[in-house]
Image (spheres, grey):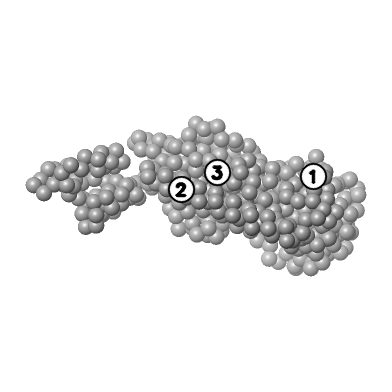
Amino acid sequence: MEKAVLVGLETQDTQWNIEETMHELALLAETAGAQPVAEIIQKRQRPDSAFYVGKGKAEEIRLIVEETNAQLVLFDDELSPSQRRNLEEAVAVRVVDRTALILDIFAQRAKTKEGKLQVELAQLHYLLPRLTGMGVQLSRLAGGIGTRGPGETKLEVDRRRIRKRISDLKKEIEEIKKHRTLHRKARQEVPLPVVTLVGYTNAGKSTLLNALTNADVFAEDKLFATLDPTTRQVELPGGSMFLLTDTVGFIQKLPHHLVAAFRATLEEVLEADLLLHVVDTSHPQAAEQMNAVQNILQQLGAQELPAIVVFNKMDMPEAHANLSALAGEWPEHVAVSAKNQVGLDTLLEAISDNLQKNHVRLDLTLPFGSEKILAIIRKYGQLEQEEYKADGIAVRAVMPRPWAEKVKNSLGEGVAEFADDE
């Protein structure tokens, strides 16, 4: 393990509890494979333009690096290229900021081709303005935190080649996006409702997916344990089915390079009929984590989607103490322990109730010989009335809106009358 000194800055604009953000930085460091050996927090009105923490504090960091034999210094914010260069000269070891650290973790965790392409695109966007003076760093062969990923062995990497690679990556990701759209259309041919798990990293989304589907998705008590989205089919108490999709966990100060690169994946959230916002209720900063998730959903344009707040990890003693405060602000919630599979029946009932809101009542007259349409209505809806008349078959049914639209379109405008099923 590389030994790391952690550095944080508390300014007048700091929104999060500095001790909590430093604790999260330590978890990120451990996830990346580093061992935190010291922690330094400085209070300033604003970051120093040259050294971020000020020249005197940079000298103090150098002394601590020497005392602890640390190989790198991790900063809790994104550094400008000049700040990073100045700091590396001052402390005489590698300097990695929060953005590079998260990108490094994503580079380790990406398993699918799409995930690897998206991570590389984010890394190159981060690297491009930092090329000046990086010849030595780019030539390193040894690896280590902040050096994994594209270009680590290429001494001659320049802006032109990186821009060309960025262009190629965007084209490849666009092709994958087209395939994703085709898969989505195929799903819509049999439009099962889609429920998507969102939440802060390590909130227990993958554990909840496994508990609801008896799947074997990798789940671990680490940040960003899963990166690539997973979809499984789930049966509701009444026998109807829905698709449950897991997504990458969010985090405060999520690098904008990642949000941009993973937009094609994150936009799967926009296709959901319902979001399950999973919360680590035992976390002391649970409310702040929820706000961070809401901010990212807003960036994606998904803040208006129907959602159920799932207060998870209720097997932890701290969760009960936090629940009363959180429940007042989020009355539409379900409390569960995905690990112990407690409260899952209540959650499934809440999902069923919410999905039912997307059902409509359908009144129409089918022409004789419409057995295929009747079969679809029986299979995907609830047929309440079927009466043969002189001009056709009078039908009344309750169906999911996508299927009701399919039936309506197959018969032409003006045939079916819709009313919300309250």
Which residue position is annotated with label 2?
182
- Choose mark 2 or mark 1, whichever is in front: 2
Task: Please provide percent x and percent y for residue 192.
Answer: 39, 43
Location of the N terminus by quadrant is top right
User: Going from the N terminus, do you reach mark 2 or mark 1 first?
Assistant: 1
* Residue 229 disc label: 3
Q: Which amino acid does label 2 sit on?
A: Leu
- Choose mark 2 or mark 3, whichever is in front: 2
Q: What residue type is labelled 3?
A: Pro
Left or right of 56, for residue 320? left
Instruction: Identify the residue shown where x is 21% and y is 57%.
Output: 414
Query: Tag 1's secondary structure?
Result: loop
251 or 167, nearer to the observer: 167
Q: Do the residues labelled 2 and 3 touch (CB within 8 Å)?
A: no
Query: Tag 3's secondary structure?
Result: loop
Q: In this view, does 282 lie above or below 62?
A: above
Which residue position is annotated with label 1?
143
Query: Tag 2's secondary structure?
Result: helix
Instruction: Identify the residue shown where x is 25% and y is 43%.
Output: 373
Instruction: Identify the residue shown where x is 75% and y is 47%.
Output: 148
Task: Please provide percent x and percent y for residue 242.
Answer: 41, 41
Residue 196 appears in the figure? yes
User: Going from the N terminus, do you reach mark 2 or mark 3 first?
Assistant: 2
Q: Which amino acid does label 1 sit on?
A: Gly
Task: Please provide percent x and percent y for residue 210.
Answer: 52, 35
Q: Quadrant of residue 162?
A: bottom right
Q: In which quarter of the image is residue 257?
A: bottom right
Instruction: Identify the residue shown where x is 75% and y is 67%.
Output: 46
